[in-house]
Amino acid sequence: SVKEGEPAVFKCSVRHTCPSYQPTLNWSHSGKIIMSYKDIGHGNWEAESLLTFTPTIEDDHGSITCTVKYHGNVQGEMTATLPIFEK
């Protein structure tokens, strides 16, 4: 859970094996997004996206979805519910 009016950070990451075709990660909520890609060894890579935004009471119990798209149009989603604690 997060507090209304205080910055919150959400992380979405996936592993993949083809550095030539890195997956894209998109969020269902707007905010500041930082993407990174790293070699984690043995032919594996990790794509990570950090979303930072300041929740309002309107975000309470809404959902945040991270959608990943791989080369070849393969897609997956991860969703989190956003409970808000007021200040």
Image (tube, rainbow, N blue to C red):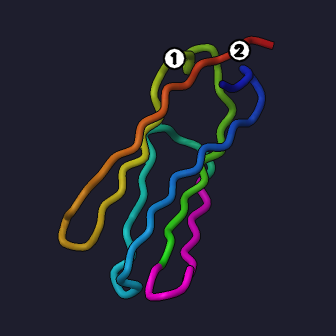
Could you say which is closer to the camera, residue 59 or residue 84? 84
Q: Mark 1 or mark 2: which comes first in sequence?
A: 1
Q: Residues within 10 Å of mark 1 (few under 14, many from 20)?
A: few
Q: Is residue 49 magenta?
A: no
Q: Which mark is residue 85?
A: 2
Residue pointed to by mark 1: 61
Spatial CA distance of label 1 from label 2 is 10 Å
Q: In x, y percent, where is residue 35?
A: 56, 65
Could you say which is closer to the camera, residue 55 or residue 40? 40
Magenta stretch, residue numbers: 33-44
For this orientation, the residue located farthest to the front is 42
Could you say which is closer to the camera, residue 16 or residue 28? 16
The residue type indicated by label 2 comes to: Phe
Could you say which is closer to the camera, residue 44 or residue 58? 44
Q: In x, y percent, where is residue 76?
A: 29, 52
Instruction: Please identify the dominant SS of the magenta region.
Output: strand
